[in-house]
Image (cartoon, rainbow, N blue to C red):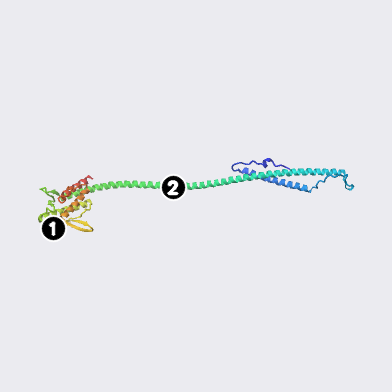
Amino acid sequence: MHKMPMQLLSPSLPETGAETGAETKAKKQAQTQAEAQTQAEAQAQAQAQAEAQTQPQPQPQTDTSALPPSRAYSQKQLKDLERTLTDRRARIESLQKATEAALMRAQRVSRLRQQIDTQRKRVDLQKQRLEDKTRHVERAAHLLEIALAQHAQAKGAIVAARRDSLAVAGQVSRQAVVLRQDRIIFEDLRAMLARQRALAVGDLAEAFPVEMAMDEADWTICGLRVSSAEGVRGWQASEETAAALGLVTRLLDALARYLCVPLRFPVVPRGSRSAVCCLFSGSVEWWPLFMLRAADRPRLHTALKLLAVDIEQLLCQHGMESVDPERKRRQLSLLPNLTQLLMAIETSSFAQ
């Protein structure tokens, strides 16, 4: 019987790593040939056993001399029987050897199958690991694509924000230029307003001249003396003081309107019947700057104090102090403070 080459019975198997397509194909061919050889050997063994069973069993040699004459064999027949028995014994021995060889080959094929199964399990394990790694790589690639998409979106947002910031910066720069121009215009208008204010205040100073009296005891406005409430004696002095205080209220009201400053105690210029208002708890109280009778002297005294507070308010706005810092003689410092205020307004207006 033909024996299979050892190269086919014991193919070299890879120890590590995934097999290539050619090696897998060679293994399959070797396995197919081994199975065919095993089937052929099994068939040969079965045929040999069947022939052995069909052959008659060798009979033991008998002594022909002891046989009866009717059963005696010829010498030639005995020799033929011995020759036949010898041939059959040789065939049986050859069949036994062939059977043993077939069994050995079957065992070898079984071992090869076990090795092939082991290698197949290894290959499957390696394939499963490779598939797991492939899935991990695909997942990592998917995550990388997502990260790249997010990065692209973030980059686009950054570019858009930068573009918007540049546009806003351009608008801010243009607005800054416009604001600088507006500021220049505002400064020019402010300077013009200050000059016009100075001119207006100069006209007021000329219209309402404030001077010291010839005896240097009192101050006059338009030639009218302003006496304290205690210094007013008689009807003529009272009317002169009331007229002078009316001019003071007219001048103070004009200055407040020119400077756009609301007075703490608003004045009501009505000639010799002027007054000062005091807002208290939602009600208006009038304090006259004239005296019709001696009983009006305390009210005139209070009105002069309120009028002095208004003049000091305008002085403080221009950084000036009263000529009477201790404010003990507020009634007598009305016109000196007013003169100082006019000079301060003219000086600051032309300085601007």
Instruction: Estimate the x, y position of residue 219 in percent, counting from the top left.
Output: 13, 49
The crowd level at tag 2 (other Cα within 10 Å; few <14, some 14-19, many 20+) is few
User: Which is more toward the observer, 134 or 171?
Assistant: 134
User: Which is more toward the observer, 248 or 89?
Assistant: 89
Q: Residue furthest front?
A: 66
Toward which corner of the image does residue 87 lie, by quadrant? top right
Q: Residue 154, which numbered label?
A: 2
Can residue 271 be seen from the camera position used here?
A: no
Q: Quadrant of the C terminus?
A: top left
* Residue positioned 67% across, 45% down in the render: 110
The crowd level at tag 1 (other Cα within 10 Å; few <14, some 14-19, many 20+) is few
Question: Which circle's residue, 2 or 1, is located before the other in the chain?
Answer: 2
Instruction: Estimate the x, y position of residue 2 in percent, counting from the top left.
Output: 72, 42
User: Which is more toward the observer, 308 or 54?
Assistant: 54
Instruction: Estimate the x, y position of residue 38 in percent, counting from the top left.
Output: 70, 45
Above or below for 69 versus 268: above
Q: Residue 295, which numbered label?
A: 1
Q: Are marks 2 and 1 in contact (CB under 8 Å)?
A: no
Where disc 2 sits, the SS reads helix
The Cα–Cα distance between marks 2 and 1, rounded to whole angstroms, is 87 Å
Disc 2 residue type (three-letter): Ala
Disc 1 residue type (three-letter): Ala
User: Which is more toward the observer, 244 or 106?
Assistant: 106
* Residue positioned 55% across, 47% down in the render: 132
Q: How many marks?
A: 2
Instruction: Estimate the x, y position of residue 36 in percent, counting from the top left.
Output: 69, 46
Closer to the eye: label 2 or 1 = 1
Can residue 183 be seen from the camera position used here?
A: yes
* Residue positioned 37% across, 47% down in the render: 168
Horizontal relation, residue 141 to residue 73: left or right: left
Above or below for 344 versus 270: above
